[in-house]
Structures are given as structure tokens and as C-alpha cells.
Amino acid sequence: MDGPEINRRPARPAKKHVSRACMGLECIMPQEIDGRKVPTKERYAVMERYAQTLESFILSKGMELPPNNDTVEAQPSALALAHNNPATSIGEEEEEEEEHIRISFPAQKPARRPEITDPTARRYSEDISGAVDLLSERLGSLQVAEDGQLRFFGPTSNLHITHVGPYPLIETVTQSIHGREHEILHHAAVDNFVDVDLEEHLLRLYFCWENPNIPVVDERTYYFERSNYRKTGRPCHRYSEVLTNAMCAVGAALTSRACPELPENLVNLFASRAKVLLDIEMDSPTLCTVQSLVILSGVEALLTRDARGWLYSGMAMRLSTDLGLHLSPKFVTDGGVQDPEEIRLRKLVFWGAFIHDRMWSFYVGRPESLDQQHISIGKPGTSDLTCGDHPNWRLYIDNGQPSVHKELPAVYGEIAKETVNLCLKMAAIRKVLYQSCQESDSNMSQLHEWSRRLRADVLAWSSQLPPFLSFNPDNPPASFVPHLAQLHMQYHAILVIIDRPFAFSPSQPSGLTEKEIETSRRSCTQSAAAIAKLIRALRRQYSLRRMNIHTVHLIFTAALVHVHNAYISPESSICATARQDLQTSCEALSEVGRSYKNALRALEVITCIKSDLLKRRQSRLKRGSVNAESPHTAQSVGKRARVDTQLLLQREALNECFPLSPSYGDCDPDGFDLLDLGLEDTGPATLGGQHLMGEAWSWTPSTDCTHYAF
């Protein structure tokens, strides 16, 4: 057989002896007889996306892309290297590559194995030690998933041992929004043109008023990645148009600017755009997907769609654990998989989602999404948050409105750290005092002792604050950032929640003394009054038109205490102060309600409670016993009591519809002296008990209080 015929045959593995006919000829495989399967378009698409991800990562580090050479220098094959170096095998090379990608998190040292004395058993143990370590691992690891993202797999998943990575044999069909945003929005009929100036205006409102208390977005990184994406079109896990639309939805709630070319409800427009894009992005979620879910959760809350908002908050925490954001950043940095900037952003996003989730749990009275014992990442610090190009917080409102040029130290990192500390204490309070499975009040004495310890712990937090984070409501500083005032509002609201089950019980709880009940009631009242003082300080410095979304619940918590003190407390001095604080809280909810609908809902609940208490006052006055000496005297006194009751109710109705100024202090203490209302008559309006969140908060407004609605 001659040389050309041999050359047309399929190539065979090289042998030690080469036939004379093949000597001097190149062994090739013609394309027409190549039986290998040609890669599908999906595989090419996966490879292209992976290459784009790598390019974006290289560019984000300020490095240049490698030159695109048409000719590739010949490299020695792995088989040749193995042939030249017998000590190296292909299996060992694969192990090195896997170790280069796999990232483990040894939170604690594994238990020591007993020594093996038998030489044969020791040799066998050494041979299988690597495999046994993988099977016995109890901590899990981060793996590169099919979409190229790092994802956490626990030890019971078995995928923590090794993962197929971005090139699996089984194709995973995923969609991407990158480069297709306009097409997706067009199909959903929300592709309205948004002017760049309007977008920038809404983003500035978000970063000024919403982000400081829930620092889930780094301003400097966001603007850099947005500019990079819109210039190059290269996707990056740090930016998405979902995030931009979610932040614009919050900004739309805070603006009064008219946009005639857009739908009247700007909040719904941007929220709908974000949710349409989010539905596709969830196929391959990234870091900015967590940020978008946190922000959209707040948007749904301000629109009073609590169910969807609660779900979004839970999804954000689930996705945080999926990406391993809750784990300690002990990563293998070989090959630049993780760098300090990425670690900082992961910490920032996780704690922002954590704060939002704990505040949601506080808002709806439900368990948290992630227990503290599963969190190993460090708390946020001063250097973890940035203020964009400026180190200070800058006041920003709508264009055209009068404002003063105000710059103050931002203290984002310090406030974020202290907010996290408060949120960690909130979980303990809910677990100890508000367990839904405990229906008996027989252990009220023990619960009161626990509440005393919890209160001491929260007070210790306040006493350890640095001077620049302290805030005395009785003597507020001349200038302060609004997120500092909200931090202290949260602190006082937590104190209210601690004492409320004992301060406003329908009857004296068994095992508690009158002194203990009075101490809890006084502490609860003082904390609620401090919130009212903080509201007045905020109103003097800034308008209540723009506040963080979670401020609504803090004001609501204080208002419930004020309304009961104003209409139930037998002490005229407490009634007078409570009436002023209640009016301040209602006016604040009304003003915040211009931005957030859930504030108007809270105001409606407070109004219905006041209406219920007014009816109870009328009933008590009608049932009041009159020690008359004659029937004529009793008749005249009863008639006068009915007239006084009608006048009192009419004045209360006028005060509700036309509130007086906060300085109004006349609450008719003599009128309250006629009321001998006991706490046992408060009925559904009572604040005490383990089931407040499930009863009083589910009231349906009755027809009797429709004239109070706003």
C-alpha cells in the first residue's frame, strides 16, 4: 500500500515503530471522514457568554484585553508533558485546575482522626485521604455554576465536591436581558422613553433619602458600572437595568416633578419595568439581582402590596445565600477569582439585604429569613460604604424648590454597623417575647424578667454609641443627617416593643406587681414621646415628604401608644402630652403619605382606634351613675351629661378633620377627670398581649369612622 492511501486513513495513536510507508508524511484526518460531533449553537452561545464575562471582569480591573492573534504558537500537549515527566499525570493537572476554581470556607477546624498504627492500613488511608476529605466535609464550598457565577453549595448537596462548571454536557437553556432590554420592555408595553435628566434626578433622590438607612447599593460602583455597560454593552454582575428601574421607582415616589410625556403613576411605571426585566434575569441571578429585589420589596411596601414585598425580601435573602454572601471571605485568590473590591461589595449587599429583611420582619411580625448562626461574614465598617465622588451627605430635593446648600458628614458605614447591631437584637426580642406558639400568659413573670434584660441590652447599645452618633431628643443637635434620626427612632421603637406586652395588658397579668406594670408603662410612654420629638426635629431640619420607607412603621408604633395614653390614661398630664404627640404623629403620617401609601393606611388604623375609644367614652358617660337626691335632679343631670357628651364628640370630630398646630396643649383635663376608664374596657384596641399583630392590625375600617378617612 502506497503512502497517499495510508495518509487518507483515520489517524491512529502513535507507536514506537513507524512503518517505512509513513516515514516523512504528516498524519492528518480529512474533514469529510471526521466522525466527531460538531458543537451546537447553544454551546457556542455558552462559550461566547463565558468569554464576555471574562472580558468584563478583566476590564473592570483596569487591565487590557490580550491581543487577538490570528496565529497561535504551538504548545506542547499534555500527553507530551506527561511522557517527558513521568511524575506528572493528567489526573493531577485536573486536580490543580479544580483547586484553582473551588473555594472552600473552613469556619472551624475538622475533628482529628485517630491515628492508624497498622502500616498497611496507614498506606491505604493515605491513598484515599483526598477522596475521604471531600466526602466528609461539613462546611460546603463555592462553585462556578453553569452560568459562570459563583454559587454556594452545602455539604449535603454533593455538588460541593465538584461542579461541572460553565461547560456542562447537559445544556441549560437560560435567557439574558443584556442587550435586549428595549425589546423586552416593548413586548410588555412599558418601553416609554425616559429622559436621561429625569433618570439622574430620580437616582439622586434615591441615594439621598432611601439608600443611607438600607445601604444595599454602592453609589460609586453603580455609576462606574452603568457607564461601562452603556458604552461597551458588555454584561457585568455588578450592573443591570433592573437595578436602575428599581431605584427610579423609589425616586418617583419622592419627587413632585410633573412628567406629562410619561404615565401619571411613575412609581408603577418603573416598578413594572423592573419586574419585567427581573423575571428574565432570575434565570441567571447575580449580585445586582439581590440589590434589585431589596429595593423592589420596599416599592411594593409603599404601594401597600405587602404580600409581594414580603416575598421579594425573602427572595433577596435566599439569593444571598445562593451566592454565598453570608459566608466569611476566606477565598482562594489564585487567578483573581476574588479581590478586595469584590469582597467589599459582597459584604455591602448582604448587610443591606439583612437590614431590610429584619425591618420587614419587624413590620409584619414574622420570623426572619436567615438565622444569625448561619452568618459568618464580618459586620460593615467605615470603609465598606462610599458616598460617590463626595465624602459628605448632600441634601437633594426636587429642582425648582427652595433649599439650602447643606453638606454633612455622611457616616454611612458607622450608621450601617449600628443598624445591624440593632437588627440582631430585634430577632432576640421577637423570639423571646412574641412567640406565636405560646398562647398562655402563665409565665408572664419570667417574660417580664427577660424583657428587663433585653431592655438593659438595648440601653447598653445606646450608651456605647460614639458622640457623633448620639442624639438627645430633648436637645437635638443644630444639624444632623436624616438617617441618624431614623436610627434613633428605630432604637426607641424597639424599646416600645419590649415593654408593650406588660404596659397595656387588658388586666393585671398574673405574677406581676403594680410597680412592674407601671415601670413598663412609663418606659413605653417615654420611648414613644422620644419618637415624637425626633419627628419634630426632622420636620424642622427637613420636610417629612422624603423619608426612608421603614420610617412609617416606626411612627405607627409610637402613635399606637399615644392614642391609648390620650384616651385611657387617668393622669391629665399624660393625656395632655399624649394628645400633642398623637397629633404630631398623625400629621407626620399624613405628610409621609404623599410619598408612601402605607403611611395613609397606618393613619386610617389610628383614626379608627380613636373613633372606637370615643364611642367607648360616650357609652361610659351615658352609663355614669348619678347620685341624685330627686328624680328631677337626676333628669337634669342626665340631660346635661348627654349635652356635654355630644359637644365633646363634636369637638373631637373637628379636631380630627381640622388638626390644630403641634403647639396646641389644651386637652380639657377636667373632662378626663370625669372618665374612670379602666384598662379592662379597652377591648380590641388594647396594646398588650402576644397576639396584637394578628388582631388589631387586621381591622377593617367600619362605617362609623368613614368621616375620618383621608
Image (cartoon, helix red, strand yellow):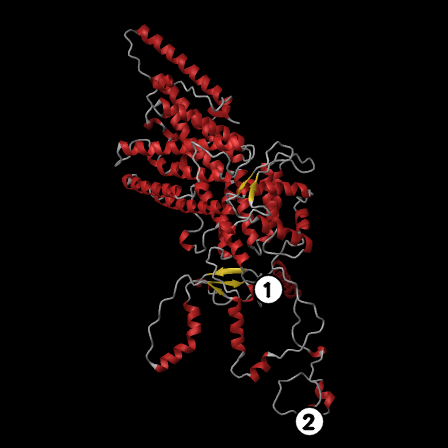
Pinpoint residue 20: horizontal percent, then vertical percent: 68, 94
Counting residues from the start of the chain, the first of labels 2 and 1 encountered is 2
- Please give left or right for residue 459 compared with residue 101 in the image: left
Residue 486: x %, y % from top left: 48, 38
Find numbered disc 1 in the image and state the secondary structure of the residue it sits on: loop
Q: Residue beneath label 1, please?
A: 171
Q: Nearer the viewer, residue 348 or 249?
A: 348
For label 2, the SS is helix
Label 2 amino acid?
Arg
Question: Compared to 664, does 159 lie above or below?
Answer: below
**Which residue in the structure is indicated by mark 2?**
20
Q: Nearer the viewer, residue 455 or 404?
A: 404
Q: Tag 1: residue type?
A: Glu
Note whether 466 is above or below 260 in the view shown: below
Spatial CA span between label 2 and label 1: 46 Å
Q: Which of the 4 image quarters holds residue 491?
A: top left
Q: Position of residue 554 (x, y in %)?
A: 45, 36
Is 42 rendered above or below residue 578? below
